[in-house]
Structure formats: structure tokens, C-alpha cells
Image (cartoon, grey):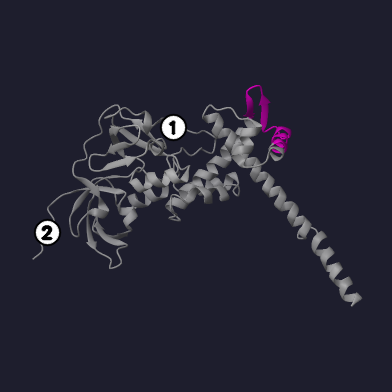
Amino acid sequence: MNIVIIILVCLTLIYLFFPTYGGLARYKKWQEKRQRELVEDALKYLLDQEQQGHHSTVQSLGTALRINPRKAIALVDNMLRQQLIERLADGLHLTAEGERWALHVLRAHRLWERYLADEAQMRLTKIHREAHRREHTLTTAELDSLEAALGHPTIDPHGDPIPGRDGHIRALEAIPLTSLEADRLARIVHLEDEPTVAYEQVLAAGLALGQIVRIIEKTPVRFVLSDGEHEYRLAPSVAANVQVAPLKDPPLPRQETMALSELPLRQEAEIVYLDESVQGLTRRRFLDLGLTPGAVISPELDNFFGDPRGYRVRGTLIALRKEQAQKIKVKRLDPAPQSQ
């Protein structure tokens, strides 16, 4: 019995103290990983606040990261020692090295969101959390490879600019929808994904990046928008999550345009444009399939289960899912054939 106990104690000690793979070594690595992720979350938060012209404090940082004041103070002290931030009279600010690191994390997050939306076909309301989980895992070289594989997209699925490898990030020139004058045309360029409840309401209403809208009713309790075909109703608090770029000149008319997914079977149509949400590799694939403005396309085969649907374009039969066909805008060429 004593021998068994001694063996168990020895095995336990080996498990705890074995180099590299022992329990304590693995716990130490987990702690280091968690600390690094916390630093990166803090740097990204500080970058976001600086871009918005806001001042950050130890208290606001702790609130944003959901950590107690003691941990927030320790985190700030750690970043000060690494010269990632500096403490000035008006609050915490990133150093040049801190900003470089923060932009790397932001680039990773937005590229992952692009991948999850375009390649993994994940719901838009789910990609932010998953991208946050993955953003801490890639080196600069790995990010370069991911960006190339995605076709070098310039914006994420919400309209946020993706930083370049050199750290340059294009400014988002937009105003909240709530600041738009009534009856003024504007293009939707950004959909804020937080809070999630408001973002889900925007998507449920049917609004999307690139859509051209005007406000036809603006009251303290609701906003009513129109894109010329449909009306969209939003509460003011939800409308504030939509950012638009006012149009100086009216857009070129796109008369009788419709989504390719709505085209009747064997009805020929001309492709007018691809939705602006089609980015990077997905856009390149569409172009490689011959889905370019001016091309003639027609639905040829319906699927018993609804998806995908067969389309003929440039003499070739291709298959597109409904969500893909919705992003291709067309105009009818000839009346649909009459059934005999």
C-alpha cells in the first residue's frame, strides 16, 4: 500500500514539475498567453478611443475589458514597463510601438471577419466574437498570407477599413444616419456591430453596405428610409448604428434593377453591378466566372431544395447560392417566355 502511495506521489510530482509539458509549465504558458491577449485587447481599445478622439483612463480601460481596478492598474503598469503606452495629463496614450502592435491586432481581427463572412459563410452577427478569439494567433507573415488568400480586401463585412501591412488605415468618411438631412441621398458605408441587438435589427430590416437610401420620415420615435423600391423603419437608437456618406450628385439611374436571385426561370437579364459587400476573393471568383457588368445571364435550373440554382452566363452553366445571387444586380432584357 505504501509503495502504491509513493508511486502516485512520484507520478504527481513528475506531472507537475516536468519541464515544458508538466502541469505547472503548461499553466505558466496559459497565464502568459492570457496576459498577452489582455495586453492586445487593451492596445486595441486605446487605439479605438484615440481614433474617435476620446481620452482613456485606467478606470475606462478596466470597464471596457471587464476587469477589476486592481487588475487594470497592474495591466497599465505592465504596458508602461514595455513602453507600449505613456501616461499624460489627459490620460493614457499609445506609443509608436504600442500603436504598431494595436494595428496588427486590428488588421488580424478585420481580416478574420472577412474570412468568416466570405469563406466560412458564418452569420454576420456571429463573426465578431469568433474573430476576437482568433485575432491573437497570427504573425505578420501569416496575416500577409491570409490577406492574399482573401484577395486583398479593403473593408471588413461591417464597412470598417482594414489596415495595410505598413499600418496605414484609411479614414472612414461618414456621418451617423441620424445626422443626415431628410430627403438627402446617401450611401450606407458602415454598419456598427455593437451592440449586437441593434445590429441584428439593422440586418433584419434588410439594410446592407453600399445601399443608397434617403430619409423620407424623421421623428423622435422612428426613421423611415427608402431605396426607391422598399421602405425601412428603424428606431432612432438603431439608426444611430448606421453610418452613411452623403452623395454630392444623384447616382446614375439603375432602372428596373433587381437581385439575380429574384429573376424568373429562363428570363434573360444583363448584369448591372456587383454589391459593394462583395470583396476580395469572392469578388475575384465572381469575375472569373464571367459575372461582370454587361454580361447576359439567365436562370436555367431550379433546385428542388431551393439552393443552389443553375445560371447560364457566357455559354457556361454555373451554380450560385441564393445569398450569392442576391449580391448580383441585373436588369431584364426581354419579357419572360409565356408558358404553353
Where does residue 18 sit, x and y in percent of width and height? 81, 61
Q: Which mark is residue 308?
A: none
Residue ID for mark 1: 172
Where does residue 55 sit, x and y in percent of width and height? 58, 27
Left or right of residue 245, residue 110 in this image: right
Against 206, is 175 above or below? above
Instruction: Judge by depth and name the residue closer to the eye, 277 or 167.
Output: 277
Tell me which residue sits at (35%, 35%) in the image.
Answer: 221
Where does residue 326 sit, x and y in percent of width and height? 30, 51
Against 10, is 230 above or below? above
Q: Residue furthest top?
A: 89
Q: Quadrant of residue 250?
A: top left
Query: Element under label 2?
Result: loop
Against 118, is 10 above or below? below
Left or right of residue 222, residue 39 in this image: right
Task: Decide if residue 289 is in sight here.
Answer: no
Query: Element under label 1?
Result: loop
Residue ID for mark 2: 337
Report if residue 159 lies within the magenta region. no
Left or right of residue 193, residue 274 in this image: left
Q: Assign the N terminus to one quadrant of the image.
A: bottom right
Mark 1 and mark 2 in contact? Answer it, CB < 8 Å: no
**Magenta residue span:** 73-95
